[in-house]
Image (cartoon, rainbow, N blue to C red):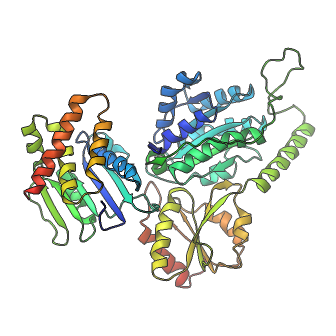
Amino acid sequence: MSTARTITKYKFAGFGGQGVLFIGKVLAQAGMLAKQQVTWIPAYGPEMRGGTANCSVIISSKKIGSPTVGKPNVAIVMNEASYLKFIDTVVPGGTLYVNSSLIPELPGRVDIRIVRVPVNEIAHEMGDEKVANIVMLGVMQAMIPAVPDDILEKVLLQLAGKKPALAEQNMRALKAGKEYAMNL
Amino acid sequence: MALLMKGNEAIAEAAIQAGCRLFYGYPITPSTEIPEYMAKKMKAVGGTYLQAESEVAAIYMVYGAGAVGERVMTGTSSPGFSLMQEGLSFLFAAEIPCVIVDVMRGGPGLGGLGPTQADYFQLTKGGGHGDYHAIVLAPSSVQEMVDLTKESFDLADCYRNLVIIAVDGILGQMMEPVEFPPFKGRKLEPKDWAASGAEGRPKNNVISYYLTPELGESENIRWGDKMSMMKEAEQRFVEYEMEDADYAFVAFGTSARITETAIDILREEGIKVGLFRPVTLWPFPEKGLTARLDQIKGWMSIELSAGQMIEDLKLVVNGKAPVGFHGRMGGMTPEPEDVVTAFKEQLLGGVQG
């Protein structure tokens, strides 16, 4: 399973603690296991101390030249500052996933698809607001699968390490995200 | 099986696999994952990680460990690298093999953590006092960071010389799939010069000066011969789309990666461009460049600095073709489209470099 593009560039952004670097890593690892070329770059700087955090991921069927992502095909914004910072960077025809729990209705764009998902509420209902990032990953995977489902799940289990409770919670969050996307 | 690994961690793992058992350093972003990884792993392999009180102390700890013949490494970032310069000059003169990683950060001054290549002059022209050069390796992917790190220890031992691995913040922080294939090294001479205990043999001194100007000069001449040998034997480069190219970019590290994408864009428009990527910044790959001089109508240096490598490029091109430049500074990177625009303006627009 692959998208129509041979190369997809992602930007994951939020504030520190929302797990945007983590879901980027999950996607990159899954891409690698799906035999794609991948790169993952964290934004590295004063952002790490309380402001916005972000990472850039590229999944490609051929060798990756530039690993930087100035103009993503897909952007995930988990807080308002990230929305404002990245909405104009998404390429026309791209997709912007918006955490509507924290980001109010703001001026948008007509040439990209904007998907608003209240991931904090969904995660809260599951009993753990910390997995809001995984819910968003589930939404993305349901709408435009980046990698085969089984590989994504395998990686999510692997990265939970020796914490079965966390692994189970992550799997539930992924499923919740997918289900939400089905009803959009 | 491939692993997804950060560049800094990949360098540290590769060093351990190459037999490096001693690491001395003072943590500084964006190189900190190197000491961090060493701190975690060195004990398990019977080695030592030691956090020095400063970079000045760290480089002289490297001196000591190298002088007794051990494989030793340090890792730092630009301001820390500056602090090490006196030590590097001493290490060169005492001919102590060692590997230094410089994960460059912005400058001059404190600088930011974003990607930059602005240490080029300092890396390739000496940096410390006296007539000397380190071998400087510039990988452009995490896999190449592994491969060159493994080889760097052999290079250091082979020539009894400093080897510096120079990367920017993106390469240090980026994760890419890597493999650690078995490494077939060079045949190396035993380190019979090392101060490793003199029982049963005359003692060895591993020092940088012998207190007479006559010896000072003859040693300099000998070192010069050694540098000529390295210059002859160790120039390395990789070419991309050069076979039929009319124009060529010269870039290393992250800017080479960005340039590859710019080349793909230009090629789609039917413009025949290629990339000449120095893998050794010193010795600068003059021979490979010279071989392309008759073919290339215009050159362009793409750097994350105000333009430093372009001076070496111009020395080789020597007026035979225009040489353009595009660079970003302070931790910013150009988009591939910016490189395309600069190329068209400077080389297709007829502006002479």
Q: How many marks?
A: 0
Q: In the current view of this chain or complex, which residue is farthest to the top?
A: B199
Residue in the image at 10% along x and 52% along y: A180
Residue B74, placed above or below residue B249: above
Q: Quadrant of residue B54?
A: top right
Question: Residue B258: x and y, percent?
Answer: 47, 63
Viewed as shown, does residue A110 lie left or right of B65?
Answer: left
For this orientation, the residue located farthest to the right is: B214
- What residue is rendered at 80% in x and 31% in y? B190
Location of the C terminus of chain B by quadrant is: bottom right
Q: Relative to residue B148, is residue B87 depicted above or below?
A: above
As drawn, B171 above or below B198: below
Q: Is residue A178 left or right of residue B115?
A: left
Of residue B148 and residue B27, the one placed in the foreground of this image is: B148
* Image coords of residue B51 (percent x, y): 53, 25
Q: Quadrant of residue B24?
A: top right
Residue B193 position in % (x across, y down): 83, 29
Tell me if I can see residue B110 in this picture.
no
Residue at 69% across, 58% down: B284
Image point (54%, 36%), residue name: B13
Residue B108 percent location from the top left of the image: 52, 50
- Does residue B27 appear left or right of residue B131 in this picture? left
Please tell me which residue lies in front, B213 or B140.
B140
Residue B256 seen in the figure: yes
